[in-house]
Image (spheres, grey):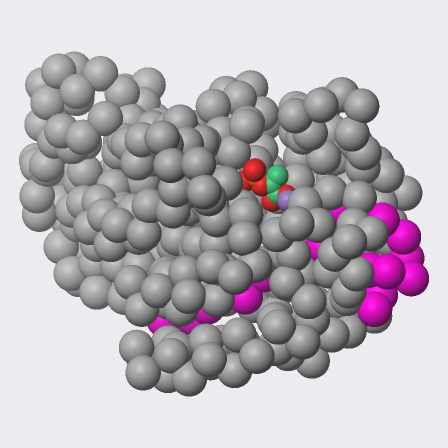
Amino acid sequence: MIIVLRPKSTDAQIEHVLERIHELGFKPHLSRGELRTIIGVIGDENKLQAEPFLAIPGVEQVLPILKPFKLASREFNPADTVVQVGRVRIGGGEMGMIAGPCAVESAAILDAIAGQVKAAGANLLRGGAFKPRTSPYSFQGLGEEGLKILRAAGQKHDMPVVTEVMDPRQVPLVQRYADMFQIGARNMQNFDLLKEIGQTRKPVLLKRGMSATVKDMLMSAEYILAEGNPNLVLCERGVRSFEDSTRNMLDLSAVPNVKGMSHLPIIVDPSHATGRPDLIPAMACAAVAAGADGVHIEVHSCPEKALSDGHQALLPKQYAELMDRLRRLAEVVGKKIS
Ligand code: PEP
Ligand code: MN
């Protein structure tokens, strides 16, 4: 349920409502907007509705949330959530431009790519140290060594770093090196991982599962939010379909669809969605036009030698050309790249 407080409610009144919720054995989630304070209460909706919250001073309205996802819903937070990763802000008109190789391969290769994507305007550096590969014989990532290389490149080029975490047991390790966790498509419904990540307060990039509906993705987001981590960005990366000329089918409608249902930022990954460098620029532009809060693109200085996903990597020069277009488009749709 959502408890809406009066515009001029005092801190003491808000505190009082929170105490009462705790006393009743429920978990409150406070959202202080510029104009209003809203408290989400999660628990048995029937029991909640039996409580006379309206009688508490400062409470203006009490509304049930009928959607299965509650904290992720637009009702819970009518304003757009802005997620801060280092000095980069994603959402509310600001864009996260994530770029880098699929996997961290060596310090020299990553350093070269990081310098080039940074010069092109990327503001977040990506690179996998733990890779979820379809085949157990494919390159699995450099593990902690990869995390160290990523951290060093991020520091040198002044970009916060994003990297995948695949298992709840890896969370403490990845947390030490990353500025933002990535939860990959294959792990979108790894509920133990979602809960573990929810226990931290580090920003999270949650990618849509390849067979997940938009609602499934929002339910996964709910797991992280329910544990108390509000720093969540969603990512549309294409879903499986009968079409076999692209790696996945990019569901661009997910962008405005999610924005209608949720306050969370959503970015688009045209690299994994299409698997084809010739299609990535058009789909990245379409994503920005559709209202995405950023794009996530794989870049490699020598795709033919890449240890994973080389077939879909853009060359740094292609990325720079694309970024020129994206910057102009961002301006047209009133967005900013910080
Ligand atoms: C990736 O970002 O390298 C990746 C594996 O993506 P996804 O989980 O979307 O397949
Ligand atoms: Mn990849």
Is 311 on the left-hand or right-hand side of 177?
A: left
Front in this rendered view, residue 144 or 61 = 144
Relative to 116, is 70 above or below?
above
Q: State whether residue 80 appears in this view.
A: yes
Front in this rendered view, residue 57 or 270 = 270
Is 67 on the left-hand or right-hand side of 106?
A: left
Asked where in the image residue 79 lies, by quadrant, the reply is: bottom left
- At 67% from the left and 61% from the top, the residue drawn is 299
Front in this rendered view, residue 211 or 12 = 211
Does the magenta segment cover residue 92? yes
Indicate the position of residue 177 as horizontal and vertical percent values: 77, 48
Indicate the position of residue 154 as horizontal and vertical percent values: 77, 63
- At 57% from the left and 79% from the top, the residue drawn is 321
Relative to 205, is 9 above or below?
below
Q: Which quadrant holds the N terminus?
A: top left
Q: Ligand 1 is in which quadrant of the figure?
A: top right
- At 86% from the left and 60% from the top, the residue drawn is 109
Does the magenta segment cover residue 10? no
Q: State whether residue 161 appears in this view.
A: no
Read off the magenta span.
91-112
Q: Residue furthest front?
A: 245
Is 65 on the left-hand or right-hand side of 134?
A: left
Is 101 on the left-hand or right-hand side of 276?
A: right
Query: How many dots with numbers?
Result: 0
Indicate the position of residue 272 as horizontal and vertical percent values: 53, 46
Asked where in the image residue 73 lies, by quadrant, the reply is: top left
Relative to 308, is 10 above or below?
below
Asked where in the image residue 187 lies, by quadrant, the reply is: top right
Indicate the position of residue 222 as horizontal and vertical percent values: 37, 32
- At 72% from the left and 35% from the top, the residue drawn is 131
